[in-house]
C-alpha cells in the first residue's frame, strides 16, 4: 500500500500504526514523506475498512447453514437434489 504526502504528493513511509477500534478496521497511520530534501513532512493519515467485495467464506457457509435449518426435511432433500458439485 502506498501513502502519499499531502504537501508534495511524493511517496511516504508508514512508520507506525495506531488501531482505533477492537476490530482493527480503523487506524491512524503515522507517516514520513520520503522527499526528504524538499519536504520531509511527517503526518497522520486515517485508514478505514469500507465494505466487502466478496463475503468471507465462513460467513457464506454459515448463512447457507442457517437457511437450510429453516427448511423441513423434505424441502432440504428437494433442494439438495438440485445441487451439483
Ligand atoms: Zn512531502
Image (cartoon, helix red, strand yellow):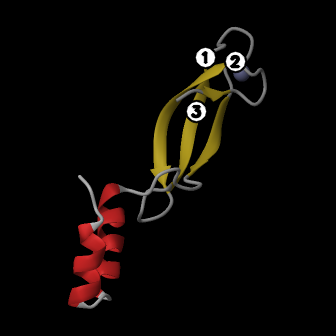
Mark sitting on residue 81: none
51 on left or right of 10: left
Work out whether 73 lies above or below 43. Answer: below
Q: Nearer the viewer, mark 2 or mark 3?
A: 2
Please tell me how crowded label 3 is: few (under 14), some (14-19), or many (20+) other residues with Cα within 10 Å. Answer: many
Q: Which of the pair 53/80 is nearer the observer?
A: 80
Instruction: Say whether mark 1 is within 8 Å of ligand 1.
Output: yes
Q: Secondary structure at mark 3?
A: strand
20 on left or right of 65: right
Q: Which residue is mark 3?
A: 31
Q: CA distance from mark 3 to mark 1?
A: 9 Å
Q: Which residue is mark 2?
A: 10
The quadrant holding residue 67 is bottom left
Q: Earlier in the sequence, mark 2 or mark 3?
A: 2
66 on left or right of 54: left
Q: Earlier in the sequence, mark 1 or mark 2?
A: 2
Q: Which residue is mark 1?
A: 34
Instruction: Name the spot of residue 53 as percent of width and height, x first.
Output: 53, 50
Q: Which of the pair 58/75 is nearer the observer?
A: 75
Measuring 43% from the left and 57% from the top, which residue is drawn there?
55
Measuring 27% from the left and 77% from the top, which residue is drawn there?
78
The reply to whether discs 1 and 2 touch (Cβ–Cβ < 8 Å) is yes
Measuring 63% from the left and 20% from the top, which residue is drawn there?
11
Q: Nearer the viewer, mark 1 or mark 2?
A: 2
Measuring 69% from the left and 8% from the top, which residue is drawn there?
37
Instruction: Say whether mark 2 is within 8 Å of ligand 1.
Output: yes
Amino acid at each position: 500500500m502506498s501513502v502519499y504526502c499531502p504537501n508534495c504528493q511524493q511517496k511516504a513511509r508508514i512508520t507506525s500504526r495506531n488501531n482505533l477500534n477492537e476490530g482493527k478496521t480503523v487506524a491512524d497511520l503515522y507517516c514520513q514523506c520520503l522527499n526528504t530534501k524538499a519536504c520531509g513532512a511527517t503526518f497522520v493519515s486515517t485508514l478505514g475498512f469500507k465494505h466487502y467485495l466478496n463475503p468471507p467464506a465462513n460467513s457464506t457457509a454459515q448463512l447457507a447453514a442457517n437457511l437450510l435449518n429453516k427448511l423441513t426435511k423434505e424441502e432440504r432433500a428437494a433442494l439438495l437434489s438440485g445441487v451439483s458439485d
